[in-house]
Amino acid sequence: MSLLLILVSGMVLIILSADYFTNGVEWLGFILGLGEGAVGSLLAALGTALPETLVPVMAMAFGASQVSDAIGLGAILGAPLMLATLAFMIIGIGLWSHRRVTPRLQKGSLERDLTFFIGSFGLAIVTGFLPSSWHTLMACVLILGYVAHAWTVVHLNRDTERVSPPADRLHLGLGSIPVWLMAWVQVAMALSGMILGARFFVMALDHASASLSISGFFLSVIITPIATELPEVLNSVLWIRRGKDTLAFGNVTGAMAFQASVVPALGIFLTPWRLTGWELAAAALAWGSASWILWRSHQKRLSRGPLLMAGLFYLTFIGLMLAWG
C-alpha cells in the first residue's frame, strides 16, 4: 500500500471520527448535566489527548536508547507547542471564515485552563534544571495538580450554563436502545477511529521521513504532534462552525492542561528529563504563546487577530530550525 494512500486514509478516518466524537460528546454532556466548560475541557480534551499521549509513552517505556528518549521528549514538547500556537491560529481562521471578530465564551473557562497550563508547564520546564532527586516529587505535584484542576472545572461548571440539547441527533442513535448507552458507544468508537487514523498518519510520515532523511527530532516535535493533535483542531473547527465557542476553546485548552501536567510527569518518571537547546526553545515558545492569549483575554481584547498572531510563535520555531537545525 502506497504511503500516499495510507496518509489519506488516516486523514479521512480522523476527520470522520472527529465528527462522530463531537456529536457524541455533546450528547454525553447534555445527559450528564455538565456545563460547556467541563465538556470541552475534560470530556473532549481528555479523549482526543489519547493519541498523542501514546507516542511518547511508547517511545520512552519500550525504547532502549537515548534516541528513544529524544523522540519521547520531542513528542511531549511538540504537542503543547502545536496546541498553543497553530490550534489557536486555526480557531482564529474559523472565526474569520464565519465573519465573526470575537468568540462567545463562558466566563472564566479559557482563563482557568490557560492559567493552569502556564503554571504547570512552567513547573515542568523548571524541573529540567533541578537535581534528579527532586524529579519524582515534581512529577507527583504535576499529576495531583491536574486532578485538582479537573475537580474544579467540574464543580464550577455544574452551577453555570449547561450544554443545550444538541441540534443534531445522535449519529448512532437507535430507538430501541437508550440514548445514554449509544452515546458512550459512539464516543468509544470515535476515539478508536481517531487513534487508528493517527496511527496510519504517523506511520506514513515516519516512512516518508526515513526516505527523505528527515531528522528524528524534527519528526517527533513537529510532524507527530500535527498528526496526533488533528482531532482537537478538527473538533474545535466543527464547534466554531456550530457557534459553540466555549466547547471549541475548551477542547484545545483542556488538552493543553493535560499536556502540561500528566504527560510531562510521565516523561519525568521515564527519562532523565534534561531540557536543552531545541527542547527549551519549543517549551519556551509554547509557554509564551499561551501567555499571550491569556493576557489578551484578561484585557478583554481576545479576538481573531490575537488568535491568528499565535501562529507566529510556531513559525518562529520553524524558522529557527530551518536556519540552525
Image (cartoon, rainbow, N blue to C red):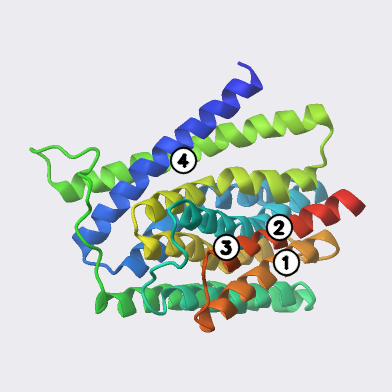
Q: Amino acid at mark 1?
A: Leu
Is 169 left or right of 105, judged from the image as shown? left
Q: Which mark is residue 285?
A: 1
Answer whether labels 4 and 2 touch (C-beta < 8 Å): no
Q: In the displayed image of the protein, which residue is found farthest to the right? A: 324
Q: Which mark is residue 314?
A: 2
Residue 48 locus on image (x, y percent): 46, 51
Q: Amino acid at mark 4?
A: Met
Q: Nearer the viewer, mark 2 or mark 3?
A: 2
Q: Which badge, 4 or 2, is on the more N-terminal residue?
A: 4
* Circle 2 Cα neighbour tier, 10 Å, few/some/many (<14 / 14–19 / ≥20): many
Q: Which mark is residue 259?
A: 3
Q: Amino acid at mark 3?
A: Gln
Residue 72 locus on image (x, y percent): 70, 52
Q: Quadrant of the N terminus?
A: top right
Q: Which mark is residue 194?
A: 4
Answer whether labels 1 and 2 touch (C-beta < 8 Å): yes
Is 215 left or right of 203, judged from the image as shown? right
Distance in Å between CA atoms under marks 4 and 2: 24 Å
Q: In the displayed image of the protein, which residue is found farthest to the front? A: 99
Q: Nearer the viewer, mark 4 or mark 1?
A: 1
Q: Nearer the viewer, residue 90 or 231?
A: 90
* Callout 1 secondary element: helix
User: What residue do we see at 63% from left, 36% from top?
Assistant: 202
Q: In the displayed image of the protein, which residue is found farthest to the bottom? A: 299
User: What residue do we see at 66% from left, 77% from top?
Assistant: 123
Q: Nearer the viewer, residue 86 or 145?
A: 86
